[in-house]
Image: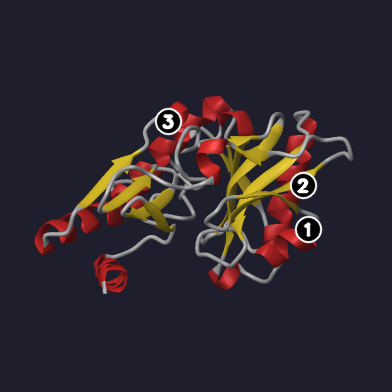
């Protein structure tokens, strides 16, 4: 498989693996805007030349949009290989490219989010363990920070205190999200409209700057759903799933 790094110079010409459509689609434009604003922070987006979900996105941890302390680590936003491209070793290619690049840039290691019990849109525990990653920290909601140190004396990264105990002061349904995931541009408005039609107390809070993201009350900032102050899920929902969740938690 051949891979290409998306940069400012080729961003408009390249397809974005997690949002394959034309540039006028809201999901594509949202993701490309996100990438263009992060490149100067050192973000790398490496993808397969072949169209499909096969890419890795990573950024220096100090510039990541997560409440973590991981000095001189590289943080992996997303490593995703699926569909017909899965099972060919491409995820290993991408991870090894990230490792080589991170070492060349003098980083101490890699870190990535996963969960004690498998959750959607998070890294697979078995895969991480197989590749040598270890658990660095865990929040009350089971979200874990895994790390791959490049030396025995590399400092172990950790969650900031604000993320260790996910809890907010707002009642009702509250969603914190960023534009890192392009699907939010489609599904967040759907939840807002559904909540309005059904008379459900719902507030979507978009995190729009790194400082706010790094002080968020959740280890996951891409999509963190709360109900009556407590964390519920990181799974993106359509109208049907949202109403099913409402029925479950209020039933």
Q: Residues within 10 Å of mark 3 (few under 14, many from 20)?
A: some
Identity of the residue drawn at 67% across and 63% down = 125
Identity of the residue drawn at 76% across and 61% down = 129
Extreme right residue here? 152
Q: Residues within 10 Å of mark 1 (few under 14, many from 20)?
A: few
User: x, y (%) of residue 189?
Assistant: 23, 52
Q: Which residue is disc 1 drawn over?
A: 131
Is tag 3's residue or tag 1's residue first in the polypeptide sequence?
1
Residue 212 - label = 3
> Could you tell me how far apart the alpha carbons at marks 2 and 3 are, in whole angstroms?
26 Å
Q: Quadrant of residue 62?
A: top right
> Could you tell me how far apart the alpha carbons at marks 1 and 2 are, in whole angstroms?
8 Å
Identity of the residue drawn at 57% across and 34% down = 43
Q: Is 129 on the left-hand or right-hand side of 230?
A: right
User: x, y (%) of residue 26?
Assistant: 29, 48
Secondary structure under tag 1 reads: loop
Q: Quadrant of residue 92?
A: bottom right
């Amino acid at each position: 498989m051949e891979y290409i790094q998306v940069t400012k110079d080729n961003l408009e010409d390249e397809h974005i693996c997690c949002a394959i459509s034309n540039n006028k689609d809201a999901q594509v434009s949202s993701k490309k805007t996100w990438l263009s604003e992060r490149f100067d922070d050192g973000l790398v987006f490496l993808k397969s030349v072949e169209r499909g979900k096969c890419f890795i996105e990573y950024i220096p941890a100090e510039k990541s949009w997560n409440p973590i302390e991981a000095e001189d680590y590289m943080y992996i936003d997303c490593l995703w290989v699926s569909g017909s491209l899965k099972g060919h070793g491409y995820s290993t290619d991408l991870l090894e490219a990230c490792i080589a690049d991170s070492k060349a840039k003098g980083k101490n290691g890699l870190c990535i989010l996963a969960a004690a019990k498998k959750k959607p849109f998070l890294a697979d525990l078995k895969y991480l363990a197989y590749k040598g990653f270890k658990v660095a920290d865990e929040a009350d909601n089971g979200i874990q920070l895994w790390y791959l140190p490049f030396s025995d004396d590399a400092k172990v990264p950790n969650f900031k205190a604000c993320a260790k105990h996910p809890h907010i002061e707002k009642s009702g349904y509250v969603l914190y999200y960023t534009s890192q995931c392009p699907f939010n541009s489609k599904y967040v408005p759907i939840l807002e409209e559904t909540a309005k039609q059904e008379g459900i107390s719902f507030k979507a809070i978009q995190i729009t700057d790194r400082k706010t993201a790094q002080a968020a009350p959740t280890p996951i900032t891409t999509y963190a759903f709360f109900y009556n102050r407590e964390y519920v899920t990181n799974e993106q929902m359509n109208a049907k799933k949202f109403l099913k969740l409402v029925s479950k938690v209020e039933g």
